[in-house]
Image (cartoon, helix red, strand yellow):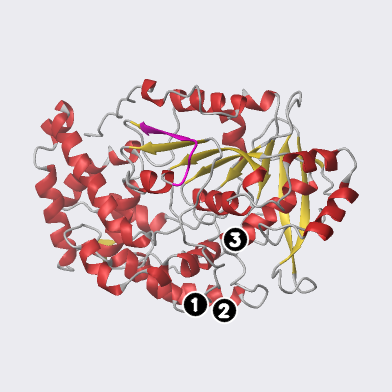
C-alpha cells in the first residue's frame, strides 16, 4: 500500500527546479518512509562520457552511499550511473534498466538497449544504474573459471574451492551481507532523487524483475510503468524450480522436433538418444580429451545437464540440441565438452553478487523435503540445487526486511511478458506475481524464450510508456513467432 509519507512525483519535479531544500525539510518533518533512501537528496553531477558501442553521447557520474545504512559513517560505495539523454527531452520519466543474473551490469549492456528503445529515447532519457556489487558499483567479481584443471571444469558449475577463495578475498573489502535487492532499491531511489527525475519507467527481465518488485513495494509512487519480462517471484526459491522447468522445456523440444519434418527425419530417435546419453553420463564412463592437456577426463552428468539447461533458455540454442545429442550418442562428445571447458567467466558478470543475493534470498528457504520431489524424473536432477547449496555455505546470510518474501501488491500499469519456450522461468510464475498487480496485462509470447523481444512486444511497450496506461494494450493481437530451423548437419 502507498505510504502517505512517501515523496510524490511533484516533489521530485520541484527538486529539479532548485527546490531540494524543501525536499530535505519534508524528509525531516515527515520522516519519509518506504526505505532507508528517504533522506534529503544528494544532487548528482554528471559529466560527458562514452559508453561501449554506443554512438550517442552519454553522461556519467556516481553517488556515494553507505555500504551498510546502519553504519552511515562506515565504508562507502560508489554507485555507477550513466544517462543516455533524450534527443529532445520532453519528459522527466526515464526508462531504467534492472538487469538479471543476479550479477549483470546495466551500463555494460547499454548498447543493445539504446537500439531497442530508439523511438522512446527521442524524448525521454535512458537511465543506467549499476546495482551495488556489479559493474561500476564495486563489482563482486569471482573468476570461477580460474582453475585450469579440466577435471574440475567438467564436474562443477560452482567449484567450491574457487567459491570459498572468492568469498575470503571479497570479505576483506566488503560486507557481503549488504548486497540484497532491498539495498539496491534504496540506492536507486537516491539516484532518482539526486538526478531530479519524476516517477520511473522500470524495464526488468529475469532476476531483475525481483529487484523491480522490491522497488515497487518500497517506493510505489516513484514508478510510472513497469515492464516485467520472464518474472522471478520474490517468494520462490528459484533453484528448486529449475529441474522441473528445464524438463518441461525439454519435453516441448521433443514435441517440436517430432513435428518438424527436417528434425524428425534427421533425428527420429531424439528422445531415446537423449535418455541414453544421460544414462552414459550417469554411469561415469564418458571420458573426453581436452585440448592442451594429456589424457582423457571424466565428463560428469551434472555439469552436462546444467549446460543443456542453459541451452533451453532460447529457441535458437535449443534448435541445436538434437544434433548435439545425436553426435554424443554416436560417441562424439566434443561439442559439449569443448563448450564447457572453453567457457570463461564473463568480465561483466559478478558471481559474487549472485551468491550474495541467492544465498540470502533463495537457498535458505529451500526445504529439504521438497528437493527430491521437485527433481524426480528430470534430466537435471538435484545437482543444481546441491551445487548452489554447497556454494552458499561459506557465504554470509543477510537479514531480510520483515515481509520481504511476501507477494508484492501494486497499482502501477504493468506489462508482463512470458515466453512459451522459456527454459529458465516457468509460465506459472507470471500469474503468481500478477495476482498482486491491479493494473497489469500479460503477453504469452509464442515461440519465444527467456527475456526474448519481438516487434509486437516492442509496440505494446512503447504504447505503455507513452500513455502510462494499460487501457489500450491488446496483447492477444501478438502473433506467434516462427521457431528457428533445427540444426541437422
* Left or right of residue 407, residue 141 in this image: right
- Residue that mark 3 sits on: 182
The label nearer to you, 1 versus 3, is 3
Q: Residue at x 60, y 43 (%)?
A: 97
Specify the label residue 164 is tagged with.
1
Q: Is residue 369 shown above or below 325?
A: below
- Residue that mark 2 sits on: 168
Q: Tags 2 and 1 in contact by the CB under 8 Å rule?
A: yes
- Say which of 268 and 333 sits in front: 268
Q: Is residue 351 shown above or below 264?
A: below
Query: Mark 1 vs mark 3: which is more N-terminal?
Result: 1
Q: Position of residue 348 (x, y in %)?
A: 57, 53
Q: Residue at x 69, y 58 (%)?
A: 33
Residue 441 magenta: yes
Q: Position of residue 16 (x, y in %)?
A: 84, 39
- Report the span colored magenta: 436-444
Residue 222 magenta: no
Query: Mark 2 vs mark 3: which is more N-terminal?
Result: 2
Q: Residue at x 74, y 33 (%)?
A: 92
Amino acid at each position: 500500500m502507498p505510504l502517505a509519507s512517501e515523496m510524490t512525483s511533484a516533489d521530485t519535479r520541484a527538486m529539479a527546479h532548485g527546490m531540494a531544500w524543501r525536499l530535505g525539510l519534508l524528509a525531516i518533518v515527515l520522516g519519509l518512509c518506504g526505505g532507508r533512501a528517504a533522506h534529503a537528496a544528494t544532487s548528482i553531477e554528471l559529466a560527458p562520457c562514452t559508453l561501449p558501442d554506443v554512438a550517442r553521447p552519454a553522461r556519467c557520474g556516481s553517488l556515494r552511499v553507505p555500504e551498510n545504512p546502519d553504519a552511515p559513517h562506515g565504508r562507502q560505495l560508489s554507485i555507477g550511473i550513466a544517462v543516455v539523454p533524450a534527443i529532445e527531452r520532453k519528459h522527466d520519466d526515464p526508462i531504467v534498466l534492472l538487469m538479471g543474473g543476479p550479477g549483470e551490469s546495466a551500463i555494460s549492456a547499454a548498447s543493445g538497449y539504446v537500439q531497442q528503445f530508439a523511438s522512446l529515447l527521442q524524448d525521454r532519457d535512458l537511465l543506467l544504474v549499476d546495482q551495488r556489487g556489479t559493474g561500476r558499483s564495486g563489482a563482486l567479481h569471482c573468476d570461477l573459471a580460474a582453475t585450469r584443471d579440466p577435471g574440475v571444469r567438467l564436474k562443477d558449475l560452482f567449484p567450491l574451492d574457487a567459491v570459498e577463495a572468492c568469498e575470503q578475498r571479497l570479505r576483506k573489502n566488503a560486507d557481503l551481507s549488504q548486497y540484497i535487492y532491498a539495498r539496491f532499491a534504496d540506492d536507486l531511489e537516491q539516484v532518482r532523487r539526486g538526478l531530479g527525475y519524476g516517477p520511473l519507467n522500470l524495464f526488468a527481465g529475469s532476476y531483475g524483475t525481483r529487484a523491480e518488485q522490491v522497488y515497487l513495494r518500497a517506493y510505489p509512487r516513484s514508478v510510472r510503468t513497469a515492464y516485467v519480462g520472464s518474472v522471478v517471484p520474490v517468494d520462490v526459491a528459484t533453484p528448486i524450480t529449475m529441474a522441473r522447468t528445464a524438463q518441461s522445456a525439454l519435453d516441448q523440444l521433443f514435441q517440436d522436433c517430432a513435428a518438424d519434418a527436417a528434425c524428425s527425419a534427421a533425428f527420429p530417435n531424439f528422445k531415446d538418444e537423449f535418455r541414453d546419453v544421460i544414462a552414459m553420463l550417469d554411469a561415469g564412463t564418458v571420458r573426453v580429451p581436452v585440448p592442451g592437456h594429456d589424457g582423457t577426463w571424466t565428463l560428469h552428468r551434472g555439469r552436462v545437464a546444467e549446460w543443456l539447461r542453459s541451452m533451453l533458455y532460447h529457441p535458437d540454442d535449443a534448435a541445436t540440441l538434437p544434433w548435439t545429442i545425436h553426435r554424443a550418442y554416436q560417441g562424439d562428445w566434443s561439442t559439449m565438452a569443448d563448450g564447457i571447458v572453453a567457457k570463461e567467466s564473463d568480465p561483466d558478470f559478478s558471481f559474487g553478487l549472485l551468491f550474495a543475493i541467492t544465498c540470502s534470498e533463495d537457498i535458505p528457504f529451500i526445504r529439504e523435503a521438497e528437493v527430491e520431489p521437485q527433481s524426480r524424473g528430470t534430466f537435471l536432477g538435484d545437482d543444481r540445487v546441491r551445487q548452489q547449496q554447497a556454494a552458499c555455505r561459506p557465504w554470509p546470510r543477510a537479514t531480510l526486511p520483515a515481509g520481504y518474501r511476501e507477494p508484492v501488491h501494486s497499482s502501477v500499469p504493468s506489462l508482463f511478458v512470458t515466453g512459451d519456450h522459456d527454459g529458465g522461468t516457468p509460465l506459472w510464475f507470471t500469474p503468481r506475481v500478477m495476482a498482486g498487480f491491479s493494473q497489469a496485462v500479460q503477453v504469452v509470447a509464442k515461440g519465444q524464450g527467456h527475456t526474448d523481444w519481438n516487434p509486437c512486444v516492442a509496440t505494446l511497450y512503447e504504447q505503455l510508456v507513452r500513455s502510462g496506461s494499460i487501457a489500450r494494450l491488446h496483447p492477444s493481437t501478438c502473433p506467434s513467432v516462427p521457431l528457428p530451423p533445427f540444426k541437422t548437419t
